[in-house]
Amino acid sequence: KFENGEEVIDDLSDHIHDLFYKGLSGGSLLYFECGKNCGPVEYAARVCPKCGSDLRVKKATGRGQVHSSVVYHIQYSEDKKTPYSVLFVELEEGPRLLGSTFIENDLALEIGTDVIAVIKPNGVLTFKAS
């Protein structure tokens, strides 16, 4: 259902994850916030952890900062060329989420680096330094 032009989630199923991945496949990074204005919630939340209310879907700017990072030197799938980093990024809106980046010139993105989301045509979320 929609309130004030924003979708409010009142179904506690996997609808939230479906919306997140549908957003990525359409080129948008979405996040969720409390329907009663407590603020953004982490991606695993099904309801607001502060007040228990339904969640609202919002479009993120994609800007954030690297919170933690790990570099992989072993190729676990054909579509991931090594080395690459898996990043835990804190979005400027507040939630944190995982994404990856390819390492250029042997320079991994360090903790505290400002990044911007890049959504590939296949819906894969990556980040690059901004």
Image (cartoon, rainbow, N blue to C red):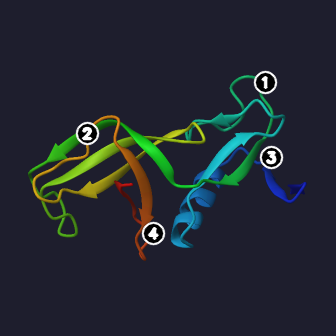
Mark 1 against mark 3, which lies toward the viewer?
1
Of callouts 4 and 1, the N-terminal one: 1
The image position of residue 78, as x and y in percent, is 17, 69
Crowding at mark 1 (Cα within 10 Å: few <14, some 14-19, many 20+): few
Q: Residue furthest front?
A: 130
Where 54 falls versus 26 (above or below)? above
Q: Is residue 87 left or right of residue 106?
A: right
Circles 4 and 1 in contact, beta carbons < 8 Å: no
Residue 130, label in figure: none
The residue type indicated by label 4 comes to: Gly
Of callouts 1 and 3, the N-terminal one: 3
Circles 2 and 1 in contact, beta carbons < 8 Å: no
Mark 3 against mark 4, which lies toward the viewer?
4
Circles 3 and 4 in contact, beta carbons < 8 Å: no
Mark 3 against mark 2, which lies toward the viewer?
2
Which residue position is annotated with label 2? 110
Kind of element beneath mark 2? loop
Which residue position is annotated with label 3? 10
The residue type indicated by label 3 comes to: Asp
Crowding at mark 2 (Cα within 10 Å: few <14, some 14-19, many 20+): some
Circles 3 and 2 in contact, beta carbons < 8 Å: no
Which residue position is annotated with label 1? 51
Residue 123, label in figure: 4
Where 83 falls versus 123 (above or below)? above
